[in-house]
Amino acid sequence: MIRTRFAPSPNGPLHLGHAFSAIVSHDRARSSGGEFLVRIEDIDGARSRQEFVDQALEDLAWLGLEWDAVPVRQSARLAAYADAEQRLRAMGLLYPCRCTRAEIATAATEQGPDGPIYPGTCKHRDIDPAGAAWRLDVNAAMAQVGPLEWVDEIAGSQTARPDRFGDVVLVRKDDPASYHLAVTLDDAADGITVVTRGRDLFEASHVHRLLQALLDLPVPVWHHHPLLVEPDARGNRVKLAKRRGSPSLADRRKSGEDGIALATALRDRRLPAGISLE
Ligand code: GLU
């Protein structure tokens, strides 16, 4: 059975881009008689707020979306992240790193999908692991599992290239796990068969495919949908963001707008002036 999810981070209000993403994910499941889940990605304890969790669930209900289980919260899954970290460490694939962002920016010679590629500075150093971040030795990990493929329902078959990111951080200094580790473990634990999310996270799936192979997790298919974009101050088309004035779903809801009608408009790709799908 198909099972999809919408996985908001409760560090701000949802906007139209989130509504589109949730609808795509919900409809992908329902059109095949499948299930749709909501997961609260509240691993970033400093920025997550209960107010945004409550608001997000009200927004989704207002759009007419129904989910099939009580939403899982990442903050309840820390033991699973620690266990996976131990396994990767026992495989000799993690190393501690104390480099700052500024140090990496200065030392890096290449850009990856997520910014400068970590030049491996701490890999051969003797680092005190207490309070350090832990990075995945991507080349050693790839050598261990061999070539990997993954499938996106829109973009087709992909050869996994996690090395494009360099040695990603899997355990942060201040947080129990990185986005990459938490989302990969959660999608497996939740039995997600189609990972539906925006195109901005397409490249991250290369890393997630590698983690699935290392941790013996089931391999879903992916569905990276186009993004709602709007012009920024310089006229570039960028993802919607509250700080540029995109109204939040909560504002629309509280002003009396009809959520079901909004969901229908998004399904029909009738978008507000200035906003397009790319
Ligand atoms: N929590 C992430 C976000 O709000 C989405 C993660 C995902 O869909 O994989 O951007």
Image (cartoon, rainbow, N blue to C red):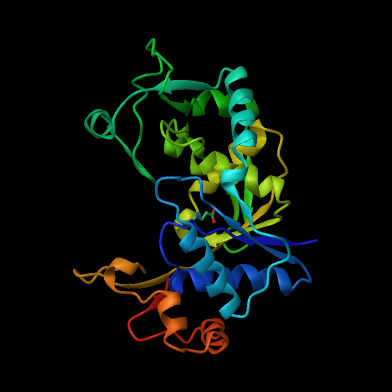
Residue in the image at 60% along x and 56% along y:
39
Using the image as rendered, state which of residue 195 and residue 143 is in the foreground. 195
Instruction: Give the residue furthest to the top.
Output: 126
For the image, the number of numbered tags is 0
Residue in the image at 64% along x and 24% along y:
87
Horizontal relation, residue 184 to residue 13: left or right: right
Horizontal relation, residue 34 to residue 230: left or right: right
- The quadrant of the picture occupied by the C terminus is bottom left
Horizontal relation, residue 52 to residue 57: left or right: left
Is 196 drawn above or below residue 48 in the view shown?
below
Horizontal relation, residue 185 to residue 44: left or right: right
Q: In terms of image quadrants, where is residue 63?
A: bottom right
Q: Position of residue 95 (x, y in %)?
A: 47, 20
Q: Is residue 229 visible?
A: yes
Q: Position of residue 5 (x, y in %)?
A: 63, 60
Is 20 drawn above or below residue 178 in the view shown?
below
Residue in the image at 50% along x and 45% along y:
43
